[in-house]
Amino acid sequence: MDINSIMKVRFLIMIFGLSMLLLGSCSSARKIRQQNVQQVIDTAKSFQGTPYRYGGSSRTGMDCSALVYLSFRSVGITLPRVSADQSRIGKRVSKRKLKKGDVVFFATGRRRRRVTHAGIITEKRPGRTYFIHASTSLGVTEDHIQSKYWSKRWVRARRIF
């Protein structure tokens, strides 16, 4: 073998090694994301049954933005405390492309486009996308965004991870 052939072989081996390293790190990053998403959802679900309390942020009572705030804090992500501010963080996501862990925002007040409510996507099934939130009447509970009530109040979604 001449020197050029040896250099080509070394180059190809180096490219192959780098490719394997990058592919491995992508799957590792994806696995870490999935673990973090599941931790956020598990934390949110651990608050199920907690009564609603405006401005509250504990198991004795909490509002919707506290649920989002505390759930993401469980994986070391600090979000703003108010849902309108939370709705500006992360990557915008269309309703069709929602995934578990995405944060969804609604306008429940008089102004139709002003974010006043937030929740976290917990599950996606054909035709039904579920989210957990702190309801003023039921406390922390799960619902689906396709319901007549929530679909009329939809504003946007964000992907934090």
Image (cartoon, rainbow, N blue to C red):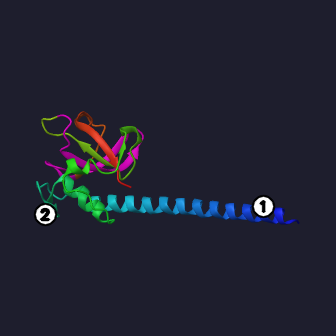
Quick check: is 114 in the magenta stretch? yes
Give how far across and how far down residue 156 sits, in percent: 29, 41
Lower sequence index among marks 1 and 2:
1
Secondary element at tag 1:
helix
Q: Is residue 103 above or below residue 95?
A: below
Q: Residue at image x 20%, y 54%?
A: 65
Query: In the image, what residue type sits under mark 1?
Result: Lys
Q: Quadrant of residue 67 in the image?
A: bottom left
Quick check: is 41 in the magenta stretch? no
Q: Quadrant of residue 96 in the image?
A: top left
Work out how far the residue at label 1 is from the one at label 2, CA to CA, in angstroms.
67 Å
Which is the main secondary structure of the residues drawn in magenta?
strand
Quadrant holding the C terminus: bottom left
Residue 67 seen in the figure: yes
Contact between labelled residues 2 and 1, with CB atoms less than 8 Å apart: no
Q: Is residue 82 above or below residue 5?
A: above
Give how far across and how far down residue 82 sits, in percent: 18, 53
In-front residue for pair 44/16: 16
Residue 48 seen in the figure: no
In-front residue for pair 146/118: 118
Residue lying furthest front = 3
Q: Is residue 61 left or right of residue 13?
A: left
Residue at the disc numbered 1: 8
